[in-house]
Amino acid sequence: MTFSLIITLFLIGFVGSFISGLVGIGGSIIKYPMLLYIPPALGFVAFTAHEVSGISAVQVFFATISAVLALRKDKLIHYQLVLYMGSSIIVGSLLGGYGGKYLSADAINVVYAVLATIAVIMMFMPKKGIDSQEIADVTFHKPTAMLSALIVGVASGIVGAAGAFILVPIMLIILKIPTRITIASSLAITFISSIGSTIGKVMAGDVLLWPSVIMVIASILAAPIGTKVSKRVNTKILQAVLALLILATTIKIWTDILL
């Protein structure tokens, strides 16, 4: 692996993980297309969709644990929500992570594109009057939380994501969790999901060691920085940033699939 490729992978990991900490996502919604398109665009050997999903799974594991550690003192994590959704999502992500080996590269890209499209639609739906609640007053429908987490876990496990990019709009719009509690809790749920995805991808033989190590180092450095910046930014701005990022990557993936 050349020095130029090492720097490229590091920058992809750093930018994606900063965004991960900033808007409460695992980062794969950004890093999946970056890993797929940027290295070949710069003249390096292209990673396959299976390899990208494997690298993403390992990287998300470390990005989310570092972000969760940075947030734990703020008392914004809703532990009951994490317990219900986390127990479902780890089962789904393990099944999806391993099951992805039986899908073609095109099929994996389609799964990614569908997830991202749903997330975009949900992020642009109106959200009113939920940011004033205190964490002790937050309630949610438990069966809906568990079922949605299971489905997201299977789909996101296939692409090596942890599912936060679609968990966030589900938690905001369907479960009506306040934004800052959603961001903190989704990172904790995403960390649990990434355990299942990573184990599944390792079992499937989709994880490349050194690219994963480089991305992990970048994640550990960048995710806590994004988390700290997020505390100083208006919640509406955070939601807008997330929606625009997902929209841009969705358009790119669908264009490639269809054309």
Image (spheres, helix red, strand yellow):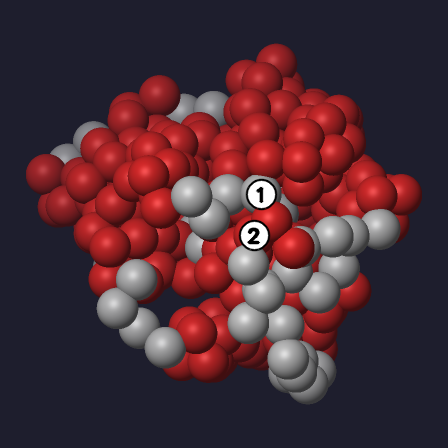
SS assignment at label 1: loop
Left or right, 219 with respect to 202, comes to left
**Image location (x, y in percent) of residue 123:** 63, 75
Which of the two discs, 1 and 2, labels the residue nearer the N terminus? 1
- The image quadrant of residue 251 is bottom right
Q: Distance from label 1 to label 2 (Cα)?
A: 7 Å
Q: Quickly name the residue at label 2.
A: 135
Indicate the quadrant containing the C terminus: top left, top right, bottom left or bottom right. Answer: bottom right
- The image quadrant of residue 224 is top left
Left or right, 38 with respect to 170, comes to left
Q: Is mark 1 in CB contact (under 8 Å) with mark 2?
A: yes
Left or right, 21 with respect to 155, comes to left
Q: Name the amino acid type tagged 1.
A: His
**Image location (x, y in percent) of residue 228:** 24, 55
Q: Name the amino acid type tagged 2.
A: Ile
Q: Residue 78 carries which label?
A: 1
Left or right, 201 with respect to 16, comes to right
Residue at 10% over, 38% down: 3
Residue that lies at the very extreme toward the left in this rendered image? 3
Residue at 55% over, 24% down: 195
Can the viewer see residue 152?
Answer: yes
- The image quadrant of residue 100 is top right
Residue at 71% over, 65% down: 176
Q: Is residue 134 above or below residue 100?
A: below
Q: Nearer the viewer, mark 1 or mark 2?
A: 2
Residue that lies at the very extreme toward the top in this rendered image? 203
**Image location (x, y in percent) of residue 68:** 39, 38
**Image location (x, y in percent) of residue 12:** 28, 52
Mark 2, residues whose alpha carbon is within 10 Å: few (<14), some, or many (≥20)? some
Residue at 37% over, 37% down: 72
